[in-house]
Image (cartoon, rainbow, N blue to C red):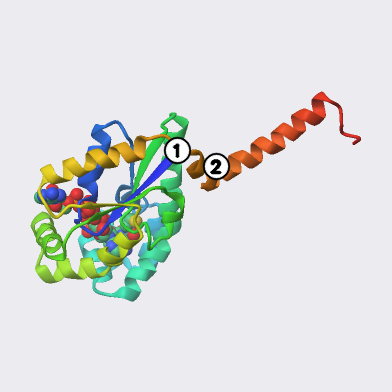
Amino acid sequence: MRIVGLTGGIASGKSTVSNLFKTHGIPVVDADLVARDVLKKGTGGWKKVVSAFGEDILQPDGEVDRPKLGQIVFSNPEKRQLLNRLLAPYISSGIFWEMLKLWMKGFKVIVLDVPLLFEAKMDKWTKPIIVVWVDPETQLQRLVLRDRTSEDDAQNRINAQMSLDLKRTRADIVIDNTGSLEDLKEQFQNVLFEVTKPLTWTEFGLSRQGAASVLVSIIVGVLIFRKVYNTESL
Ligand SMILES: CC(C)(COP(=O)(O)OP(=O)(O)OC[C@H]1O[C@@H](n2cnc3c(N)ncnc32)[C@H](O)[C@@H]1O)[C@@H](O)C(=O)NCCC(=O)NCCS
Ligand SMILES: Nc1ncnc2c1ncn2[C@@H]1O[C@H](COP(=O)(O)OP(=O)(O)OP(=O)(O)O)[C@@H](O)[C@H]1O
């Protein structure tokens, strides 16, 4: 199975690109949705976060008040790192289970949409890595418009992530989403071609999965050979 990494900055257009993948029948594991699940009332993540941040972050119904927790962590790097540390194991195992389900359904290509792909070091799992880049001014405007928030709040959220310019240097494929949706769709056609083309032997051999498969094949081959030719005593 090919696991494609999709990342970028907040409001750079990852979900918009994810939707294009979905309309072409390629499933997407959305880390933001997984992160929501692991923070639902009563879960292990919820318990850890409530004991670290206190009951003040809860709504009357016991669910986490997300905008309130957002205000706290996006204006305080230490608290954000604490939240990340508490939730990271739940988020990674949630993502892993989603991937396993898709693999069991027989999908050959899946996309991992993870805003913090590099920060959380999940880039090691994925190839190719797509970064959705946008110029800083457009990013700020789109975030303010989408979340109906102030420029200061939006800028805090942008600053909480690795810069988009750094992310693009670590990408295999860069999508520039500064232009219109039509521009984006045009670039997407090439991306779709790249991620659905068969792996070359070199790529297959170089990938960890490839190396593991070759190793397993050699071991199985040797075992079969020994069984068939009864060479255990050799
Ligand atoms: C702080 C929370 C409660 C705010 O919730 P809210 O509904 O306002 O935002 P939402 O979850 O939809 O996130 C919106 C965007 O913020 C950015 N973002 C979210 N968490 C973080 C973080 N810890 N650091 C940097 N950026 C982040 C992402 O680009 C994300 O797409 C929430 O973002 C959260 O629980 N974050 C920690 C979990 C996490 O790391 N999520 C990212 C998935 S890898
Ligand atoms: N090319 C575009 N032209 C105009 N608006 C766009 C374009 N691409 C995305 N948008 C809009 O910009 C906003 C941010 O896009 P999107 O939600 O896809 O970003 P995201 O990277 O998934 O954000 P987040 O990290 O918060 O999940 C949305 O309101 C979306 O409709």
- Callout in the foreground (2, 1): 1
CB within 8 Å, label 2 to label 1: yes
Residue 130 vertical position relative to residue 77 in the rendered view, above or below: above
Residue 46 left/right relative to 142: right
Counting from the top left corner in percent of width and height, residue 61 is at 25, 53
Q: Which residue lies under the disc numbered 2? A: 210
| Residue 3, picture quadrant | top left
Counting from the top left corner in percent of width and height, residue 128 is at 38, 48
Residue 78 vertical position relative to residue 87 in the rendered view, above or below: below
Counting from the top left corner in percent of width and height, residue 90 is at 43, 54
Residue drawn at point x = 26 percent, y = 40 percent: 190
Residue drawn at point x = 36 percent, y = 60 percent: 170
- Element type at mark 2: helix
Residue 59 vertical position relative to residue 215 in the rendered view, above or below: below
Q: What type is the residue that disc 2 sits on? A: Gly
- Image quarter where the C terminus lies is top right
Q: Nearer the viewer, residue 166 or 9?
A: 166
Residue 6 left/right relative to 202: left
Q: Which residue lies under the disc numbered 1? A: 199
Q: Nearer the viewer, residue 40 or 222?
A: 222
The residue positioned farthest toward the top in the image shown: 228
Task: Tell me, yes or no, if residue 65 can be seen here.
Answer: no
- Element type at mark 1: loop
| Residue 138, picture quadrant | bottom left
Task: Tell me, yes or no, if residue 43 can be seen here.
Answer: yes
